[in-house]
Amino acid sequence: MLPERSPYLDPMEAAYCDLDATDKALGAVVAQLMQLYLEKQRLHQELNNTEDYETVEGIEWQLKLLRDEERSLHRIESGLQSRLKSTQ
C-alpha cells in the first residue's frame, strides 16, 4: 500500500492554506457576532417600547439565549485568533 499523500505540494503551501482557512473561519465568527449584536439591539429597542409583562419576560429570555450564544462565539473567536497568532 502506498502512503497517503497530502493534497498540498509542499509544507509551506499547506501552512498557507491552513492560515487562510482559519482566517475565513474567524471572519465567519465575526459575522455571526455582528448578527447577534444587531438582534440584541432590536430586542432592546422592543423591550423599551413595551409594557406588557409577558412580552418583557419573553424578550429577556431571548436576550439571555443570545448572551449564551455570544459567549460561545467569543470563545471560538479567541481560539481562532490564537491560532492565527501562533502561525505568524
Image (tube, rainbow, N blue to C red):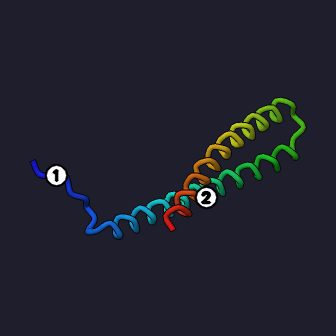
* Residue at the image point whose x is 48% and y is 60% from the top: 22
22 relative to 36, above or below: below
The image position of residue 86, as x and y in percent, is 53, 61
Q: Nearer the viewer, residue 50 or 70?
A: 70
Q: Earlier in the sequence, mark 1 or mark 2?
A: 1
Residue identifier under label 1: 3
Q: Report which quarter residue 71 is drawn in.
A: top right
Q: Residue furthest right?
A: 51
Could you tell me which secondary element the residue under label 1 belongs to? loop
Question: In the image, what residue occupies the spot 19% across and 52% down?
Answer: 4
> Callout 1: few (<14), some (14-19), or many (20+) C-alpha neighbours within 10 Å?
few
Q: Residue 58, located in which quarter of the rendered image?
A: top right
For the point 87% across and 41% down, which residue is it?
Answer: 50
The kind of residue tagged 2 is Val
Quarter of the rendering containing residue 55: top right
User: How many C-alpha atoms fall within 10 Å of the one at disc 2: few (<14), some, or many (≥20)?
Assistant: some
Task: State the image coordinates of residue 63 (x, y, percent, origin top left).
Answer: 75, 40
- The alpha-carbon separation of the residues under discs 1 and 2 comes to 39 Å
Residue 59 against residue 6 in the figure, above or below = above
Name the foreground residue: 55 vs 29: 29
Tell me whether circle 1 and circle 2 mark residues in contact (CB < 8 Å): no
Q: With 64 as the anchor, is 24 left or right in this view?
A: left
Residue at the image point whose x is 69% and y is 37% from the top: 65
- The residue singled out by tag 2 in the image is 30
| Left or right: where 63 falls relative to 3 | right
Of circles 1 and 2, the one toward us is: 1
Label 2 secondary element: helix
Residue farthest toward the left in the current orientation of the protein: 1
